Amino acid sequence: MTIRGVDHINIGTDRLAETVAFFKGALGLEAGWRPPFAVPGAWLYAGDAAVVHLVELKSGKRPCDEAALDHFAFAIDDWDGACQRLEASGVDYRATDVPGSTIKQIFLRDPNGVNIELNYRGAVAASAKAEAAVG
């Protein structure tokens, strides 16, 4: 068996509508098809991939600060655009550089206290995007 990447993140929430609005507004994900499960929820897409699965709970769970799993991360290709989107959405965030690298990071929280990291790899991301457009 070979792990080929992370397929999706699942978040249980008692704030479904607010959480959907957060991921759509702050991160630009889109709500899309979800199987007709017995429990309410939503799948949020980045392109064709349902990267965030939400399941509605009767009561919320503990935030990441109280869990063994601290955060999940997305790779982004537009640093300025990400900061502008978060500011326009009224989302508090912390930006930082990774020492000894060209990676810049943004840290934020969803309405359930889930920690999210956004990683921008600068010139590496821009060159890969340019190669994809040419190829």
Image (spheres, grey):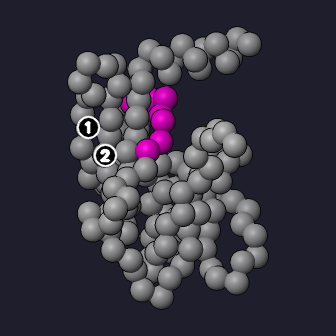
Q: Quadrant of residue 84?
A: top left
Q: Is residue 6 above or below residue 77?
A: below
Q: Is the N terminus in the top left, top right, bottom left or bottom right quadrant?
A: top right
Residue drawn at x 38%, y 58% is 69
User: Which disc is residue 109 wearing?
Assistant: none
Q: Position of residue 66 (x, y in %)?
A: 27, 68
Q: Position of residue 120 (x, y in %)?
A: 41, 29
Residue drawn at x 41%, y 20% is 122
Badge 1 vs badge 2, beta-carbon distance below 8 Å: yes
Q: Read off the magenta span.
A: 73-79
The kind of secondary structure element at disc 2 is: strand
Residue drawn at x 52%, y 48% is 28
The kind of secondary structure element at disc 1 is: strand
Q: Residue furthest bottom?
A: 58
Q: Which residue is mark 1?
A: 95
Q: Which residue is mark 2?
A: 107
Relative side of 34 to 9, left or right: right
Kind of residue at disc 1: Ala
Q: Is the C terminus in the top left, top right, bottom left or bottom right quadrant?
A: top right
3D distance between C-alphas at marks 1 and 2: 6 Å
Kind of residue at disc 2: Phe
Residue drawn at x 34%, y 19% is 102
Q: Position of residue 108 (x, y in %)?
A: 32, 51
